[in-house]
Every structure is written in C-alpha cells, then in structure tokens.
Image: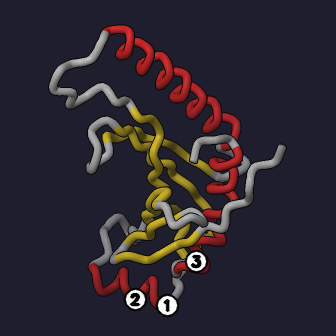
Amino acid sequence: MDKEKIKWKIEYDYNYYKVYDNKGKLAGYFFPHYMNNDSEEDDDAIEKMNKDHTQVSRGTLLVPMAKLDLLDHEEGIEIEYAIASLDANLIRTKFWRDWLSRKAKSLSLYGARIYTAREDRNLLSIAIGAAGSITLGEKGVKEFLTPLLDSLHEDNLL
C-alpha cells in the first residue's frame, strides 16, 4: 500500500525555511549554506540572496529523529519503561543510520549530526547535509527538498 503523497509547504523565515506537511504541521527546518569565501554573509546580503532567488550549493535539513520520553519525570520512571524506550529508540536510530547509508548518493546527502531539540530535551533532531543546485525562495527550496522529504515520509521517518 502506497503512503499518501504529501504536499509540502515551505515558508521563508528570516534566514531559514520552515517545512510544513499538508496538514500544516511543522515537519522541520531548512538552513541554506550562505557561506561565501569562508565568511558568513550579513543579514542584508542574505535577505537579498533570498529575494533574488540566488543559487547555493548546500543546505541542512533539520527534522525530528527520536522521542526519548525519559527526562523530566518528577516521580521518576520504571526501569522497564526506560529499557523499552531505549530499545525502541536504538532500533529507530539504527534505521536512520541505515537509511542515510542507502540514500546518501541518490539524494546527494553528505553528512548528518544529532542534536537535542531546543524546545524539547526528550527529542533528538537530526541535521542532514544536502548538496545540489538550490534556488533560494520558497518555490526553489521546495523543489529541491521534495525528493528528500518524500523519501523520509515514505520510509516513516517523517
């Protein structure tokens, strides 16, 4: 059975893009690499690059990876609950690792790093580096990200 096709929505916000699914739920963030000659561009230059639909060659997609649900329980948690959560998240994390290995070449992915989400200490996020011809602006970023987002969705990672 095929998964429902998602119509992704991309929204520019300051110097990054928010990614929403077709239900309006925030799915992740995309950070274009604005670097030029190893120095960061200033805010005005970044705004102009986006307004002018400048092309960049790399960016980072940040999406949720694993929900631990182990921290910040005032009464504590049962050891079996902790083990079950860790086991489930180990399986999911290994699936992510294998997915990245399988898809890196076809989707031009060049690396990934794991972070604790700013808003939720129980959530691990993954930052995936992607390379290609990325035209800045909501339409261009959507066109670039859609194959990656679709693949993540089809494999139940988003």
Q: How many residues crowd mark 2 within 10 Å: few (<14), some (14–19), many (20+)?
A: few
Q: Are marks 2 and 1 in contact (CB under 8 Å)?
A: yes
Q: Position of residue 6 (x, y in %)?
A: 67, 61
Which of the 4 image quarters holds residue 98? Answer: top right
For the residues bearing labels 2 and 3, Cβ distance under 8 angstroms: no
The three-letter code of the residue at mark 3 reads: Thr
At x 41%, y 43%, the residue is 125
Which residue is pictured at 15% across the width and 26% down the height? 74
- Mark 2 or mark 3, earlier in chain: 2
Q: Quadrant of residue 38?
A: bottom left
Please state which amino acid type lies under the numbered disc 1.
Asp
Residue identifier under label 3 = 135
Q: Residue at x 38, y 9 (%)?
A: 80
Label of residue 48 in the image: 2
User: What is the CA distance from the residue labelled 2 to the residue labelled 3?
Assistant: 13 Å
Q: Nearer the viewer, residue 116 or 131?
A: 116
85 vs 142, left or right, is left
Secondary structure at badge 3 equals strand
Distance between the alpha carbons at the discs numbered 1 and 3: 9 Å
Say which amino acid is labelled 2.
Lys
Residue 94 versus residue 7 in the image, above or below: above
* Element at label 1: loop
Who's the residue at 51% across and 43% down the image?
111
Q: Which residue is mark 1?
A: 52
Between 1 and 121, the one nearer to me in the picture: 1
